Each structure stands twice: as C-alpha cells, then as structure tokens.
Image (tube, rainbow, N blue to C red):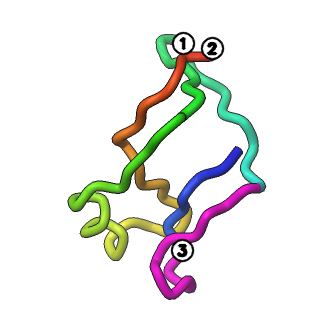
Amino acid sequence: MHALVNDTSHPLAVNLRTDLSEPDPAPGEVVVAVEASTVNRGELALLAARPAGWRPGQDVAGVVVR
C-alpha cells in the first residue's frame, strides 16, 4: 500500500511510503481503492503538529473494495 506519511526528517515534512501493510477495517469501516487524493490546506498546517507516522489525505475519491 502507498501513503503519504508525516516524516519530520524529510525536507518536505512528508514522505511517500510504499511498504505499508494493507488496512484491516473495523466493523462499520470500509477499504477504499483510492484513485485520486489531495492534501488540503488544513492538513498542510497540521504536518508540524502531528506525530511522525500521521497520514494526511482525508480528501479522496475511489472505489469501495471491502
């Protein structure tokens, strides 16, 4: 799985990780195969405040696969 991850050691404060495990949804949750995503202005402001490993990108479009 690919994801942008908060990484304070990276010059841009985020790092594209490609080695993440597939999510395991809890009851009432779904897994979405994301086709498009954006990091919004609010999330950019949060990068400095969130711990390492936080994943910005709440605005997504895709298909529910599970």
Query: Which circle's residue, 2 or 3, is located before the other in the chain?
Result: 3
Task: Determine the secondary structure under disc 1.
Answer: loop
Question: 37 above or below 45?
Answer: above
Question: 66 above or below 3?
Answer: above
The residue that disc 2 covers is 66
Task: Determine the secondary structure under disc 3.
Answer: loop
Q: Nearer the viewer, residue 26 or 21?
A: 21
Where residue 27 is drawn, which disc sits there? 1
Q: Is residue 10 magenta?
A: yes
Task: Determine the secondary structure under disc 2.
Answer: loop
Q: Amino acid at mark 2?
A: Arg
Whole-percent x and y of residue 25?
60, 23
Please identify the quadrant where the C terminus is shown.
Answer: top right
The residue that disc 3 covers is 7
Q: Is residue 56 magenta?
A: no
Q: Nearer the viewer, mark 2 or mark 1?
A: 2
Q: CA distance from mark 1 to mark 3?
A: 30 Å
Query: Which circle's residue, 1 or 3, is located before the other in the chain?
Result: 3
Q: CA distance from mark 2 to mark 3?
A: 29 Å
Quadrant of res 17: bottom right
Whole-percent x and y of residue 26?
57, 20
Q: Main secondary structure of the magenta part?
A: loop
Q: Amino acid at mark 1?
A: Pro
Magenta span of residues: 7-18
Q: Nearer the viewer, mark 1 or mark 3?
A: 3
Residue at x 54% of width, y 74% of height? 7
Where residue 63 is drawn, which disc sits there? none
Q: CA distance from mark 2 to mark 1?
A: 11 Å
Q: Nearer the viewer, residue 15 or 49?
A: 15
